[in-house]
Amino acid sequence: MLLCPGLKHRWFFTSARPGDLHTVLDFAKVADTILFLLDPLEGWDSTGDYCLSCLFAQGLPTYTLAIQGILGLPPKKQIEARKKLSKVVEKRFPDDKLLLLDTQQEAGMLLRQLVNQKQRHLAFRDRRAYLFAHAADFVPNEENNFVGTLKISGYVRGQTMNVNSLLHIIGHGDFQMKQIDAPMDPFPLNPRVIKSQKDPGMAVEIGVMDAVADMEEDPKVLMKADPNRQESLQTEVIPDPMEGEQTWPTEEELSEANDFLKERSKVVKKVPKGTSSYQAEWILDEDSENDGEGDEYDDIEHEDFMEEDSQDESSEEEEEEECETMTIGESVRDDLYDEKVDKEAEEKMLEKYKQERLEEMFPDEVDTPRDMAARIRFQKYRGLKSFRTSPWDPKENLPQDYARIFQFQNFINTRKRIFKEIKEKEVEGAEVGWYVTLHVSEVPVSVVEYFKRGAPLIGFSLLPHEQKMSVLNMVVSRHPGNTEPVKAKEELIFHCGFRRFRASPLFSQHTAADKHKFQRFLTADMALVVTVYAPITFPPASVLLFKQNSNGMHSLIATGHLLSVDPDRMVIKRVVLSGHPFKIFTKMAVVRYMFFSREDVLWFKPVELRTKWGRRGHIKEPLGTHGHMKCSFDGKLKSQDTVLMNLYKRVFPKWTYDPYIPEPVLWVKSEISAVPEVDMQ
């Protein structure tokens, strides 16, 4: 803590461990000013550039650039270093100046620069009260020593801190507050002066530590929580099974429906005595018509073309050339590199690259299964006349998880009303700038142990409803520094506003329509919408997506912002079944390999067909029992064309929300000894 009564300011300086990215981002969420200290020769390395990318994506508060150690260089190199630094800094900070920080005078100029700077505001923190812990104390409960009351002391920032609102401790979850105390400020900007009784002319200034020691009276209690007005910690709705929530039928219900259809499909016939059930199937009624026009097509034989490989056997003897042999020692660098390679991870990554490449070449195309009927494999899918204009009810066939979430009748109006109350309504509590102690109840002992290890403890006061679970939609763009394939429903780490959590999201296209196409991979060429179950957060809020690598490090894969809190946003997955024209007529064609049974053709007969070359058509009738079908189109097909059928179903994210994130492995620079080069000539 640095007190400057002359400048009427005080600063609390803190820093994160090198490479601890999450702590750096947490500091940036509450810091008034970030001081970037640059290396006099290079400015910053790849790790520093990576941190800057994350800070810019999250939202950068007021900052200042300074150089330390440039006076230790020779005079000629000082000029070169300044020119080089100006070019490096211009890429990230084009309009900012570099300050020197080597002497006492330069340090004073830096403090004046910090005082006169215009503060940059971050919207997500200006509407909430927040506190950076300077001290923390833990009082365990009598029943359970692992849970107790956490006393956090610090200065209130942002908005007035109300004891009845919930407190979110970053990285640990949401908690209720019991009371707010107002102890004496341990870092007063103007310390009190007490005159001595023995010598009236002698004045004693009470220092920081002396003031704390002499403060014998109990701290003043500002507010105590009112149980009738206190926000609830309820995050989920407890579903009532008697309310008839819409869910997909269970396996038992589907089997009962099939048995009922079999009973209804039984037909009573008059047959001669002694006829078996198999023979009765072949006896036709008098009124029945023969519909087996395509039955003669049942026994089509497919020609198999065998190719014979001809190999020319030639035995040519090559003359052995005289060459000099020499022994070269194995490279130490290669040995160290091979020890760090994980073969299983390499195989999995190779498989992901293959899947991503296939998705780019043949989007949404899948193979029709041979061991299962297509009408069963794709029973949850449906055909649409038009993906853009065809109706789809957002309330039908909802999963069981939707019974646990909250939904606003009008999210935009609720957000406007809450933000208006923040501006106009006066809230009772601790004012901005006060030094207070928050009594937080039912906190695990791991939180204070986390603080004692040197990690920051940051608390944000939640707005109404922000502890409740819902469906969050975020617009993100792929970070150019990461090229690894990221598949949908993989576990990712989110920094959404002031929250940190883990979840498995869905990816979908960012369009203005009522239906949005599901994306199997996070693409690099366009912005996508990420959908996930998470606590409600009112935008604006920045979003950062990280992926935990096999070595424990967290890599930034995407950045963006919070779009909306809307469970009715429909993410539609498309499946494309492909077939090949076998016989082509004027406007008719026989298509095969799309289905492999007659029943599947009849099941999907109402769905419209299209081709890769722009033709439209539909199925007229099945031919035989092997899945061949007669189709009509709006024009003649080409032999190299492919017939496609689009099927759609709505998909939902997985409930994998977890507010606890494992600490990442810090960056470690591995130094490998130089290997002597071998002259191969």
Image (spheres, rainbow, N blue to C red):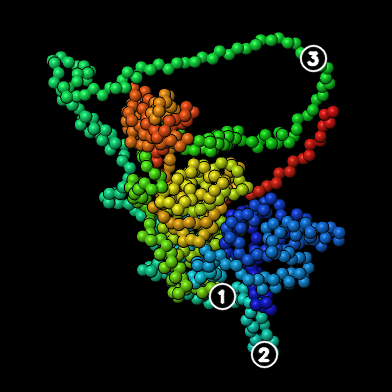
**Which residue is at 70% across, 36% downward?**
336
Q: Amino acid at mark 1?
A: Met
Quadrant housing residue 324: top right
**Residue that badge 1 annotates:** 184
Q: Secondary structure at mark 3?
A: loop
Give the label, 1 or 3, closer to the camera. 3
Q: Position of residue 84 (x, y in %)?
A: 77, 56
Q: Is residue 288 left or right of residue 75?
A: left
Q: Secondary structure at mark 1?
A: loop
**Residue that badge 2 annotates:** 200
Q: Amino acid at mark 2?
A: Pro
**Which residue is at 73% across, 64% downward?**
98
Q: Is residue 599 left or right of residue 15?
A: left
Q: Is residue 190 left or right of residue 140?
A: right
Quadrant housing residue 416: bottom left
- The quarter of the picture where the N terminus appears is bottom right
Q: Is residue 665 left or right of residue 521?
A: right
**Which residue is at 14% across, 18% downward?**
271
The image's mark for residue 320 is 3
Between the C-alphas of marks 2 and 1, the distance is 26 Å
The image's mark for residue 615 is none
**Which residue is at 52% across, 56% downward?**
561
Image height of 363 relative to 191, above or below: above
Q: Position of residue 307 (x, y in %)?
A: 54, 14
How many dots with numbers? 3
Q: Amino acid at mark 3?
A: Glu
Give the label, 2 or 1, closer to the camera. 1
Q: Earlier in the sequence, mark 2 or mark 1?
A: 1
Residue 373 visible in the displayed image = no
Q: Position of residue 432 (x, y in %)?
A: 53, 73
Q: Secondary structure at mark 2?
A: loop
